[in-house]
């Protein structure tokens, strides 16, 4: 069966869309579509698995926290940028493009 990651795109104007593309033991591949969304103030993801994220369309800014070192930093992502978010790394979505869909490919694995 053939599918296309860009079509059809869900309407994410009122909330991010999360679609599992492939699930196997120890691995899940997901398409995320954002449209101006960001993590709520003070909210941090802290996952029990590694996540590799590729930005396919739009733009985004991720925030990271290292509580032990007492520092936070941000990373801007453009089309084609990817990042490995290690298990337990506190992170958040600071912003996504407001004038176009932001499309992420996320690979979650243990």
Image (cartoon, helix red, strand yellow):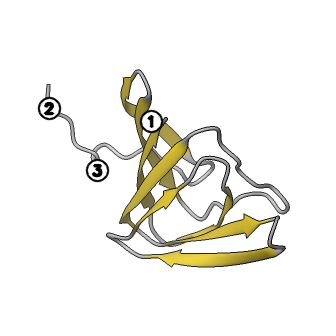
Q: Residue furthest top?
A: 25
Quadrant of the image occupied by residue 72: bottom right
Residue at the disc numbered 3: 6
Horizontally, residue 35 falls left or right of residue 82, namely right
Q: Residue at x 22, y 42 (%)?
A: 4
Which residue is painted at 28% across and 50% down in the image? 6
**Front disc: 1 or 3:** 1
What is the x, y in percent for residue 104?
A: 42, 55
Q: Quadrant of the N terminus?
A: top left
The relative height of residue 6 versus residue 64 in the rendered view (above or below) is: above
Disc 1 secondary structure class: strand
In the picture of the structure, the residue carrying the numbered disc 1 is 19
The vertical placement of 49 against 71, above or below, is: above
- For disc 1, the neighbor class at 10 Å (few under 14, some 14 to 19, many from 20) is few
Residue 23 vs 64, above or below: the answer is above
Front-lying residue, 28 or 40: 28
- Residue 67, percent across and down? 82, 65
Question: Which residue is at a point 60% across and 47% down the rendered structure image?
Answer: 87
């Amino acid at each position: 069966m053939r599918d296309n990651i860009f079509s059809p795109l869900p309407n994410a104007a009122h909330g991010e869309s999360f679609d599992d593309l492939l699930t196997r033991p120890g691995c899940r591949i997901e398409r995320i579509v954002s449209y101006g969304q960001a993590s709520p103030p003070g909210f941090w993801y802290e996952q029990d698995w590694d996540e590799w994220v590729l930005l396919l369309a739009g733009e985004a800014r991720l925030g990271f926290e290292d509580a032990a070192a007492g520092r936070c930093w941000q990373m801007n992502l453009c089309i084609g940028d990817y990042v490995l978010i290690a298990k337990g790394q506190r992170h958040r979505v600071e912003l996504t493009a407001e004038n176009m869909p932001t499309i992420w490919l996320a690979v979650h694995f243990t």
